[in-house]
Image (spheres, rainbow, N blue to C red):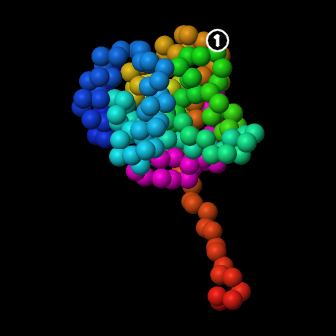
């Protein structure tokens, strides 16, 4: 299979990603990646780990607070796709529970921000094999490795851009 290259991914990052093979790297890397992505406003982060990554902002299902995860993504037509692999762990990532509770999410792709509606695709869904192939192509077949590590099904999340809700702000009575 040929490597899918994203023009936004620096060559050095693709090279380092290739050297890592199927390893996810040290545990602090995902937190550092998310921090760097947010701290630089997306100037760094999109391709710094060697594959395209986005920031997924969801509402905490219990707290209602905004939660952020940095995730590898693929494209399925105009949709953005992420895998709820949790690196092959036995539990779904927390952000997936947030999406189950509220499918409205915000995405940051590099410096671009957009509103989206998420749809969870499970292994029994007719779209699952095709969308999984998209994700495997982007992430050096790591999702096959993650599926082998766990007995739980690994859901995929397909997110389609929606129109941002118009917020009308009326001026106080004295300023009209």
Q: How many discs appear?
A: 1
Q: Is residue 127 left or right of residue 99?
A: left
Residue at label 1?
151
**Quadrant occupied by the N terminus:** top left
Give residue 37's position: percent from left, percent from top. Answer: 42, 41
Provide the major secondary structure of the magenta segment.
strand
Q: Residue at x 56, y 40 (%)?
A: 68
Q: Is residue 116 visible?
A: yes
Q: Residue 68 or 1: which is nearer the viewer?
A: 68
Farthest-out residue, right: 62
Q: Residue at x 71, y 46 (%)?
A: 64
Instruction: Kindly state the secondary structure of the residue where label 1 is placed.
Output: loop
Is residue 109 covered in magenta? yes
In the image, farthest residue toward the left: 11
Q: Is residue 31 above or below residue 7?
A: above
Q: Which residues are magenta?
A: 102-123
Which one is nearer the viewer's eye here, 51 or 43? Answer: 43
Q: Position of residue 11 (x, y in %)?
A: 24, 31
Instruction: Indicate the quadrant where residue 77 lies.
Output: top left
Quadrant housing the C terminus: bottom right
Magenta segment: does it hold 147?
A: no
Residue 75 appears in view: no
Residue at (56% x, 10% y) in the render: 149
Percent across and percent down for residue 86 are: 57, 23
| As drawn, 37 above or below 5 | below
Residue 17 location, x and y as percent? 33, 23
């Amino acid at each position: 299979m040929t490597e899918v290259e994203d023009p936004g991914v620096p060559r050095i990052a693709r090279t380092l990603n290739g050297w890592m093979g199927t390893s996810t790297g040290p545990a602090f890397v995902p937190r550092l990646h998310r921090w760097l992505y947010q701290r630089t406003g997306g100037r760094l982060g999109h391709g710094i780990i060697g594959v395209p990554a986005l920031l997924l902002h969801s509402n905490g299902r219990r707290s209602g607070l905004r939660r952020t995860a940095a995730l590898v993504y693929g494209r399925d037509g105009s949709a953005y796709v992420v895998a709820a692999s949790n690196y092959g762990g036995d539990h779904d990532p927390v952000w997936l529970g947030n999406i189950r509770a509220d499918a409205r999410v915000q995405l940051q792709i590099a410096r671009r921000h957009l509103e989206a509606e998420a749809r969870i695709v499970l292994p029994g869904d007719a779209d699952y094999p095709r969308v999984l192939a998209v994700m495997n192509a982007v992430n050096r077949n790591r999702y096959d490795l993650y599926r082998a590590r766990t007995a739980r099904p690994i859901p995929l999340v397909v997110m389609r851009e929606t129109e941002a809700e118009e917020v009308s702000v009326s001026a106080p009575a004295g300023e009209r």
